Amino acid sequence: MPPKLLAPSVLAGDWWNIGKQIEETIKGGADLLHFDVMDGHFVPNITAGYELLSHIKRRTDIPIDAHLMIQEPDRYIPKFVSAGASWVSVHIENNPHIHRTIELIKQHGAKAGVAINPGTPLYLLEEVIHYADFILLMSVNPGFSGQSFIPRSLERLRKLKRMRDELNPDCLIQIDGGIKEENVREVVRAGADVVVVGSGIFGAKNIREKTERIKKLILSEVSV
Ligand code: DX5
Ligand code: ZN
């Protein structure tokens, strides 16, 4: 059985207090930190880059998962890995050489993930799933935290899980966007192994308790 992991998404945090908030999620049982990278081209928003990531990495041992929502990811992958990202995902939509990109991520020693937007058909993953360490299924359109979960994502999760079980049982399924305490069990039941939670954790008064509660729910649920 694949592990069930919780990845708080730091984009949703309060950047004035981000160090303390990250520590709270770790005390609450976070397994990895999800770090969203946006370039204002692939998505209509700009966030942080590898230098900021390296500052976080210097202060904590938790693995960092860099979700690259950028054009020309190959140019930056080595920098993100040497800054401390041990999981790196890139989007399938803007990449005609996705196999090469996956190999590049692996050569640098990180787990390689392929991210897919809500409007992109899952059959595009049929080849690449053989090589990927994880698939990141977007359940909102990438660009912002705090958006609502797109309900059809549950059906997509089930379908992706069937594809994964058949083609590459070692590949993990990560879900990202609009996950809260209220719907986390549903996404795990539908097939998610790694759950990204942004505003659902960082929007809470008590971040540590919220992380603990969501982690417990993830571990209590089994995918069917
Ligand atoms: C959206 C990002 C997500 C986002 C999740 O483009 O990829 O990781 O930060 O935030 P919530 O959980 O608030 O939707
Ligand atoms: Zn993300």
Image: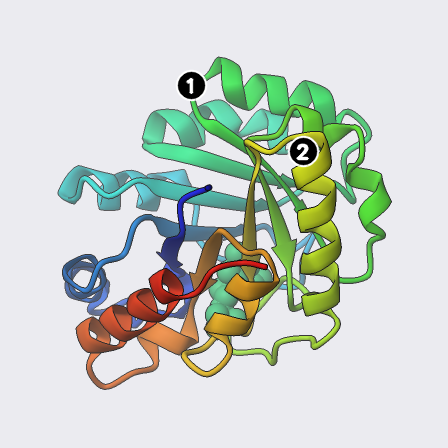
Which of pointers 1 and 2 lies earlier in the amino acid sequence? 2
Residue indicated by mark 2? 72
Q: Are marks 1 and 2 in contact (CB under 8 Å)?
A: no
Residue indicated by mark 1? 109
Left or right of 185, for residue 22: left
Query: Which residue sits at x=19%, y=81%?
Result: 206
User: What's the image's color scheme?
Assistant: rainbow
Left or right of 197, for residue 45: right
- Residue 46 seen in the current view: no
Does 59 sit above or below residue 224? above
Q: Nearer the viewer, residue 28 or 198?
A: 28
Image quadrant assignment for residue 117: bottom right
* Kind of residue at disc 2: Glu
Does 76 sit above or below residue 61? above
- Residue 44 seen in the current view: yes
Furthest-front residue in view? 224
Furthest-top residue in view? 107
Element at label 1: loop
Q: Quadrant of the C terminus?
A: bottom right
In x, y percent, where is residue 83?
A: 33, 31
Does 24 sit above or below residue 117? below
Left or right of 187, for residue 20: left
Q: Nearer the viewer, mark 1 or mark 2?
A: 1
In x, y percent, where is residue 160?
A: 71, 50
In x, y percent, where is residue 164?
A: 67, 40
Does 99 sit above or below residue 13? above
User: How many residues crowd mark 2 within 10 Å: few (<14), some (14–19), many (20+)?
Assistant: some
Query: Which residue sits at x=53%, y=30%?
Result: 76
Q: Nearer the viewer, residue 85 or 192?
A: 192
**Mark 1 vs ligand 2: CB below 8 Å:** no
In x, y percent, where is residue 84?
A: 32, 32
Mark 1 to mark 2 CA distance (whole Å):
19 Å
